[in-house]
Image (cartoon, rainbow, N blue to C red):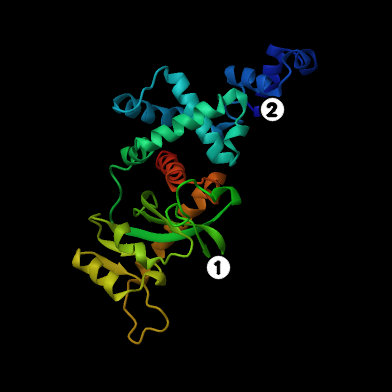
Amino acid sequence: MPVQDQIGDGLGILGRPENFLPVLGSVDILLCGLESHGFLRNAMDRTLLTDEQWAVILPFLLSHPHVHVGKPHACRAFLEAVLWVLRSGGQWRLLPAARGAWNNVFKRFARWQGRSVWAELQAHVAREPDLQHLLIDSTVVRAHPCAAGAEQSSAEAEALGRSRGGFGTKIHAVTDALGNPLTFILTGGQASDIGQAERLIGEFPANAVIADKGYDSDAFVTVVEERGMQAVIPSRSNRLNPRVYDRHLYKERHLVECFFNKIKHYRRISSRFEKTAHHFMAFLHFVAFLIWTR
């Protein structure tokens, strides 16, 4: 049934808007009532978890030693409130009343980050990656002015820095052969790609590492080959002896670019509003979970 018809049926149950809006005094209450009857589930699906995603999250949370789930429906409402902030990019204080009290949602979000719940949630769904090859790259995210000024900290400590693109954060990422995220590293926007390359590939037992010319370094290629992996990295234009690489396999690099495109559909990622790097990283872990389970 079309969403418009569903909403129309909902109004038929709850009454005409002009009859009850003056009494309720808030459009949020109308939307909450419609959602409780399931009429807006499809219309709002970008800020709601699917039943399949919730079926993955709930057992993980119930088994986590540092998470008190309480009532499952309330816990799901909390996650969907965080998803609303993540997707819309809205301020915590502007969280709709139907989503819960913003300060309670934020405190729980921050508490989960302090207990590594968000990182472990990503790891929970990334237990069987396709390690045929690794894809590494980075992208710069512009920082909003409100991201500056973390108390008792510095821009460098919070992964903020100025580059040609302005003041922002650089997200270094490694994905598996299907473009699913494995690891993130945050640095200031001015940091080089090659400086984080060895940390990115970690100890993953892949067959090859695919990267662009920004990772063309004799030292890095040596590290890759010593770990038994093929370096699929084109040479810089000023290299005297260009390296031979697998051009066919290099075409797979578009998957990491597609990954960055996916995460930037979430406005809390496409622009950085968080003062602290660990809160921004928490959103990245949540987005990674959503990509793994979509």
Question: What is the quadrant of residue 174 in the picture?
Answer: bottom left
Residue found 62% across the figure and 20% down from its top: 32
Residue 88, x across and y down, in percent: 59, 40
Residue 200, x across and y down, in percent: 32, 57
Residue where numbered disc 2 is placed: 4
Residue where numbered disc 1 is placed: 164
Left or right side of 212 for 164 = right
Q: Nearer the viewer, residue 79 or 65?
A: 65
Q: Amino acid at mark 1?
A: Arg
Please tell me whether residue 294 is drawn above or below residue 277 in the rendered image. above
Please tell me whether residue 30 is drawn above or below residue 132 in the rendered image. above
Callout 1: SS: loop
Question: What is the quadrant of residue 201 in the picture?
Answer: bottom left
Split into 4 quadrants, where in the image is the N terminus?
top right
Callout 2: SS: helix
Residue found 34% across the figure and 38% down from its top: 116
Please tell me whether residue 53 is drawn above or below residue 39 in the rendered image. below
User: Which is more N-terminal, label 2 or label 1?
Assistant: 2
Question: What is the quadrant of residue 250 in the picture?
Answer: bottom left
Q: Residues within 10 Å of mark 2 (few under 14, many from 20)?
A: few
Residue 224, x across and y down, in percent: 25, 66
Residue found 52% across the figure and 45% down from its top: 274
